[in-house]
Amino acid sequence: MATRRAQRPQLAEAYNGCVRALSDLRAKHIGLTGRYIGRFVRDEGAAMGTGGTEFVALLAKSRDETRARELA
């Protein structure tokens, strides 16, 4: 059975381009969020996002899950 990428290479490449663009956006979001929240944190170990979440871990997981969706 042929892979999806082999069946429709142009569509697969367009899809992968979108996944990479979204992954890049998520990576930039991590940096922007870190700088913004860092302005208000007195203790570096206490940097928390909305609702007390560890925002870097949450956003990094989202970025990594997005990257994993790229077609081989």
Image (spheres, rainbow, N blue to C red):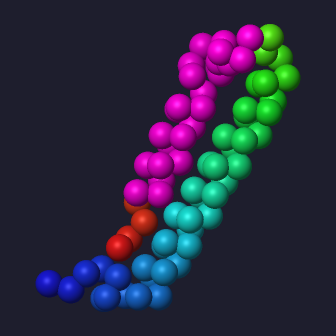
Dominant secondary structure of the magenta stretch?
A: helix
Taking the image as shown, residue 5 lies to the left or right of residue 57, namely left
Q: Which residue shows up at 85% across the image and 23% down it? A: 39
64 versus 68 height, above or below: above
Residue lying furthest front = 44
Percent x, y of residue 19? 52, 64
Magenta stretch containing residue 30, yes or no? no
18 versus 60 height, above or below: below
Taking the image as shown, residue 24 lies to the left or right of residue 9, namely right
Taking the image as shown, residue 28 lies to the left or right of residue 3, namely right
In the picture, the quarter occupied by the N terminus is: bottom left
Instruction: Place residue 71 in its image quadrant.
Output: bottom left
Percent x, y of residue 38? 79, 24
In the picture, the quarter occupied by the C terminus is: bottom left
Q: Which residue shows up at 67% across the image and 40% down it? A: 30
53 versus 68 height, above or below: above
Q: Which residue shows up at 62% across the image and 64% down it? A: 21
36 versus 41 height, above or below: below
Magenta stretch containing residue 57, yes or no? yes
Percent x, y of residue 51? 60, 14
Q: How many numbered marks does the figure carry?
A: 0
The region drawn magenta spans 43-68
